[in-house]
Image: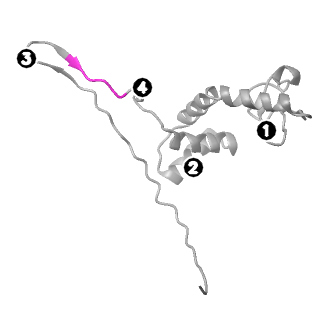
Amino acid sequence: MTGRRQVLELPPGQVRVTEHQIVTRRCGCGQVSTGTAPDRVAAPVQYRPRVTAPVVYLYVGQFLSTKRTAQALRDLFALPVSEGTDAGITARAGTDLGAFMAAVQAAIGAADVAHVDETGPWPGAAGTATTPTWRSPPPQVSPLTTTPRNARSVW
């Protein structure tokens, strides 16, 4: 072999929408029957993990505003989401962290040394000037939480 060249490309942003139509019909005997959606489809519009992951990453991980997150999703993936959708997806993602936070707390508790650092709030943070942000970074975990209480009550 005398050389090698690689070209990387992302496929064009494309959203795949699957619509489940629920129909109500009346038969000749007068009985009315209504279909049902699949079990995993509980709302009129749902966003699957490949949509929600970039929302949470851009909004929480990269600290974009909901407006800029929505704009990035439109620009990058042709995904039409609103600022409210971004905020809702992020709020729901936060409720699914129970097992993860339990593992993080166990790792911090098992660490020989747990460094906890307190910072003032970021602009637009979830509280007032008296609400600190706590960060405890053992080597493998680095949770971030905002609370009006002291660090001992957090970890």
Q: Which residue is mark 4?
A: 42
Q: Secondary structure at mark 4?
A: loop
Q: Which mark is residue 72?
A: 2
* Amino acid type, residue under disc 2 in the picture: Ala
Residue found at the far left of this picture: 28
Name the N-terminal-most of marks 2 and 3.
3
**Residue at screen point 45% across, 33% down:** 46
Q: CA distance from mark 4 to mark 1?
A: 34 Å
Q: Calculate the distance from the C-alpha at mark 3 to the C-alpha at mark 4.
A: 30 Å
Q: Quadrant of the N terminus?
A: bottom right
Quote the CA–CA distance across marks 2 and 4. 27 Å
Residue 46 appears anywhere in the view = yes
In the picture, the quarter occupied by the C terminus is top right
> Residue at the spot x=84%, y=38% of the render?
137
Callout 3 touching callout 4 (CB < 8 Å) = no
**Location of mark 3 (residue):** 28
Q: CA distance from mark 3 to mark 1?
A: 64 Å
Mark 2 or 4, closer to the camera: 4
Report helix, strand or loop for mark 3. loop
Q: Does the residue at mark 2 contact the one at mark 3 (Cβ under 8 Å)?
A: no
Q: CA distance from mark 2 to mark 1?
A: 26 Å
Mark 3: which amino acid?
A: Gly
Q: Which residue is mark 1?
A: 142
Foreground residue, 121 or 14? 14
Mark 2 and mark 1 in contact? Answer it, CB < 8 Å: no
| Region rendered in magenta | 33-38
Q: How far apart are labels 2 and 3 at the CA level?
A: 52 Å
The amino acid pointed to by label 1 is Ser
